[in-house]
Amino acid sequence: MRWPKYWSFSFSISPSNEHPGLISFRMDWLDLFAVQGTLKSLLQHHSSKASILRHSAFFTFQLSHPYVTTGKTIALTRRTFVGKGMSLLFNMLSRLVITFLPRSQRLLISWLQSTQQWPQDWKRSVFIPIPKKGDAKECSNYRTIALISHASKVMLKILQARLQQYVNRELPDVQASFRKGRGTTDQIANIRWIMEKAREFQKNIYFCFIDYAKAFDCVDHNKLWKILKEMGIPDHLTCLLRNLYAGQEATVRTGHGTTDWFQIGKGVRRGCILSPCLFNVYAEYIMRNAGLEEAQAGIKIAGRNINNLRYADDTTLMAESEEELKSLLMKVKEETEKIGLKLNIQKTKIMASGPITSWEIDGETVETVSDFIFGLQNTIINPKMAL
């Protein structure tokens, strides 16, 4: 569904309650959009095709049995942050329009849920590379942000709300990424508290801060769908996700123009609110298969054995001896490679309060450090120091 068809469908349905004193619907709004250049061919697509859709048996059924309420649609749209999408349509404009056209937006979302087919525009992303540091001629020295269609974000929020309730049941307490009431500061506090208790009871403690190489970009789609099924995610949600990822396209925008559209066959979508949730499931599969929950290695706290703390792809392993820590790391490495990810040994660090030897993995030496930057701030100064 292209933008002209999307808006012509929206404006072909009259609102249930007119708002006195506001700009009238249909032609006034169409003229406004035409002046702004947002929807150049809107008028020629107006009314005919949308009227057919509006009076079809499918939409008559949807009015009686809606999947999504109008109030829910409005609430989700208003919570969408202000910014630009790949269509250069300001999100504030979308929020304004949804106030006037909630019924049509709800019908569009219900249609998508029923057919499970996404408009091709909603599958497209615009990548904008931003230099980080180092040689600007190296692509690896750029951070990429992605712009996606604002119209798709309402549906993505609905899908996220339904998906998250199933994912939360599967995730353990040690995972704090993108979960309500949890965050990086909680994991930092946990690590520092564990360090303090180890010092209080005069025990050595060993940490391994794991870094994955391009973790979000290396997720295998087929393995992801299999993992979602094993985690008990309903088939209709998985099917929606599969269709969203099937045939997705992207272009790279620079100061010299944009590239041709190209297919994406790997990784979770950049700029999509579903990506952290999906990666959490992917990472949980690694830890389950590595058997960390059943492993004896770890830190004993109040009768519970804790050997890892996680925030998305940032994983911290911990144990009371060097041998136990290395055993945990090798288990995680083995399971990581089975599903297409790889450890970045150069950025993986070890920190210990006791004696430790040099480690080599795949011919690379794992660096031992006395402090570690966690959560964009130097919070762990030294495992031998108190809070």
Image (cartoon, helix red, strand yellow):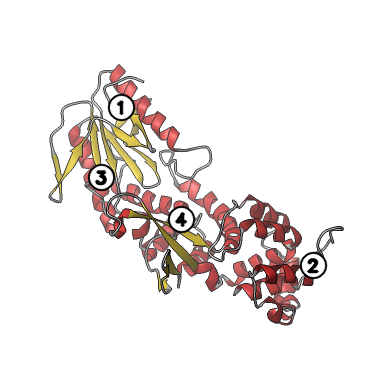
Out of 232 and 248, give the one closest to the viewer: 248
Q: Which residue is mark 2?
A: 25
Out of 26 and 314, give the one closest to the viewer: 26
Where is residue 160 drawn, in percent x and y? 55, 54
Residue at figure coordinates x 77%, y 70% from the top left = 13
Where is residue 307 drawn, in percent x and y? 31, 36
- Which corner quadrant of the image does residue 200 belong to? top left
Instruction: Name which of mark 2 and mark 1 comes first in the sequence.
Output: 2
Q: Is residue 341 above or below residue 65?
A: above
Which of the two discs, 2 and 1, sits closer to the camera? 2
Q: Label 3's element? A: loop
Q: Label 4's element? A: helix
Q: CA distance from mark 2 to mark 3?
A: 57 Å
Q: Is residue 353 above or below residue 269?
A: above
Instruction: Name which of mark 4 and mark 1 comes first in the sequence.
Output: 4
Q: CA distance from mark 4 to mark 2?
A: 37 Å
Out of 337 and 36, give the one closest to the viewer: 36
Q: CA distance from mark 3 to mark 1?
A: 18 Å
Q: CA distance from mark 4 to mark 3?
A: 23 Å
Disc 4 residue crowd, few under 14, some 14–19, many 20+, Cα 10 Å: some
Is 367 left, or right, of 16 in this rendering?
left
Is 385 left, or right, of 39 in this rendering?
left
Q: Which residue is mark 3?
A: 347
| Circles 4 and 2 in contact, beta carbons < 8 Å | no
Instruction: Name which of mark 2 and mark 3 comes first in the sequence.
Output: 2
Please state which amino acid type lies under the numbered disc 3: Lys
Badge number at residue 336: none
Q: Which residue is mark 1?
A: 381
Q: Label 2's element? A: loop
Q: Which residue is mark 4?
A: 275
Q: Label 1's element? A: loop
